């Protein structure tokens, strides 16, 4: 057994104490000798314990420092590994692209078609081999993605929130294949995948402003909306629409003046038609449809009955209403647009152009298209301009456009908020709404009618000033006449 330095010192001091006692005066009493020996041993013991504690503390500090250094080294290695894993180290451009739709087809007039158009355009511009698979059932998601991979595609676009889990799993399992997920939000996702996100709440807000303005011009007080499954993108459209209407008419109430319902499908056109007729029966005079073929069927039904309608995703005048050939096209006053085609084009072009620095900027996360980037907006009146002019009066369409564009500018400048969570699509809490602070330099009115009120106020002020000037002139004339009369009396 090896003794520590302090232990060895203890025994030396104890032995020395016994030696002193043994060599002490012969006449010392036995009791004095014992006390002296005891004191020396106790002192030696205390010193030895103190030295032992100091040595133990030093050893513990050294061990702790070494452990911390090891942990820091391990963390640094882990961070380096994570950073390396989050960056695509590649120089060759992709050569092929495959698209998997959400439930629906590439000619369904909504975001499946828009994604397909973007994929077709980028494939033509970069000479990519392009193929697509149309999904019939949610159960086919994984198999459809795997078919793209088995066919040799080195990039895959999947469309819709519902296919996200299957897309992420495929991206993790196939790190050499690139994935772009439309309407799929990523947080610390795989480096070979980008989620395309849109501010649908902003697009919905703009057409909600338009719907309320048209209702006001027509003397109506009820609008409605038919929506697909309540996934985040659809919730953003709906809540944005309702908040836009309330921005114009804050006295309106959701459920009374603003009707709406989610469906349990994107494809059930009969359900869309049924909901449209329900809201028409409840007094809605303008209907927004946001839910794939289901929403398109709803607005087609309403337009056929002479109601103003609003489409979604792309300008449905060109799709659902066949550029004016379908009945009711003259009642489509706008569409809440989101440039899915542009998002798909941009993301795939990074890969086709071997611009992996830009890909790595968004890889594992999201590429967001908002109003500022012209990723969302509202479509023109098309044939409904003549209808609005005939029904509401000359100059009304131009006035409506001006007011909606003003709201768009305020959104871009950060002067107003949609009050919608841009991730979940849910309404913000009242506390969060209250905490919203307009950007610096914002100088806008609380509602769409304040500008007119200001104009009236300026006119009133002008009239008051003129009246005041006239009163002052009258008073001055009276004073002058009084002075003249006094002078005349004095002369007499």
Image (cartoon, rainbow, N blue to C red):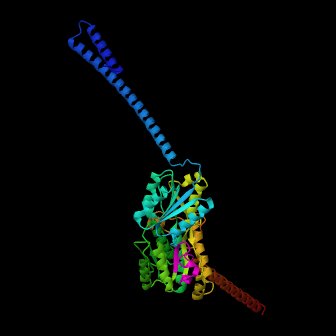
User: Which of these two is toward me, 315 or 37?
Assistant: 315
User: Which of these two is toward me, 104 or 276?
Assistant: 104
Image location of residue 74, percent across then percent down: 45, 39
Residue 284 is left or right of residue 392, and the answer is left
Residue furthest out toward the left = 30
Residue furthest out toward the bottom = 492
Judge whether residue 108 is colored magenta. no
Q: Locate the C terminus and report the quarter of the image it occupies.
A: bottom right
Residue 56 is left or right of residue 73, and the answer is left
Image location of residue 408, percent across then percent down: 58, 71
Residue furthest out toward the right = 491
Q: Is residue 387 above or below residue 260?
A: below
Asked whether residue 428 appears in the rendered view, the answer is no
Judge whether residue 323 is colored magenta. yes
User: Which of these two is toward me, 396 or 148?
Assistant: 148
Q: Is residue 48 above or below residue 355?
A: above
Magenta span: 309-331
User: Which of these two is toward me, 300 or 62?
Assistant: 300
């Amino acid at each position: 057994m090896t003794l520590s330095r302090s232990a060895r010192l203890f025994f030396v001091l104890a032995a020395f104490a016994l030696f002193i006692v043994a060599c002490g005066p012969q006449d010392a009493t036995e009791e004095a000798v014992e006390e002296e020996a005891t004191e020396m041993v106790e002192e030696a013991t205390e010193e030895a314990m103190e030295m032992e504690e100091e040595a133990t503390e030093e050893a513990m500090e050294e061990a702790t420092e070494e452990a911390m250094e090891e942990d820091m080294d391990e963390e640094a290695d882990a961070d380096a590994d994570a950073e390396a894993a989050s960056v695509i180290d590649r120089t060759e451009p992709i050569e092929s692209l495959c698209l998997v739709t959400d439930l629906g087809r590439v000619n369904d007039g909504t975001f499946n078609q828009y994604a397909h158009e973007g994929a077709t355009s980028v494939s033509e511009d970069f000479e990519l081999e392009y193929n697509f698979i149309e999904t019939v059932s949610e159960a086919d998601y994984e198999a459809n993605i795997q078919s793209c991979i088995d066919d040799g595609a080195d990039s895959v676009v999947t469309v819709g929130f519902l296919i996200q889990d299957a897309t992420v799993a495929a991206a993790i399992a196939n790190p050499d294949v690139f994935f772009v997920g439309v309407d799929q939000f990523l947080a610390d996702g795989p480096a070979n995948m980008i989620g395309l996100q849109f501010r649908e709440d902003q697009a919905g807000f703009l057409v909600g402003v338009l719907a309320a303005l048209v209702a006001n011009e027509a003397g109506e007080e009820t609008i409605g909306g038919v929506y697909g499954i309540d996934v985040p993108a659809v919730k953003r459209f709906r809540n944005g629409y309702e908040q836009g209407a309330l921005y114009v008419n804050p006295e309106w109430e959701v459920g009374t003046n603003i009707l709406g319902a989610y469906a349990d499908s994107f494809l059930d056109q009969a359900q869309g038609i049924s909901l449209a007729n329900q809201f028409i029966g409840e007094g809605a005079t303008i209907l927004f449809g946001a839910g794939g073929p289901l929403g398109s069927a709803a607005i087609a039904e309403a337009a056929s009955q002479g109601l103003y309608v609003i489409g979604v995703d792309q300008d449905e005048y060109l799709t659902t209403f066949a550029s004016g050939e379908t009945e009711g096209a003259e009642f489509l006053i706008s569409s809440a647009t989101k440039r899915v085609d542009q998002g798909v084009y941009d993301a795939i072009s990074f890969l086709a152009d071997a611009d992996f620095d830009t890909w790595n900027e968004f890889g594992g996360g999201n590429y967001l298209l908002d109003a500022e980037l012209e990723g969302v907006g509202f479509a023109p009146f098309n044939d409904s301009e003549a209808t609005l002019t005939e029904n509401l009066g000359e100059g009304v369409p131009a006035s409506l456009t001006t007011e909606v564009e003003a709201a768009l500018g305020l959104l871009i400048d950060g002067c107003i908020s949609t009050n919608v969570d841009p991730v979940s699509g849910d309404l913000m809490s009242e506390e969060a709404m209250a905490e919203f602070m307009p950007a610096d330099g914002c100088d806008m009115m609380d509602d769409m009618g304040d500008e007119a009120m200001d104009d009236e106020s300026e006119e009133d002020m002008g009239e008051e000033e003129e009246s005041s000037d006239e009163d002052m002139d009258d008073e001055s004339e009276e004073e002058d006449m009084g002075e003249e009369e006094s002078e005349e009396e004095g002369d007499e």
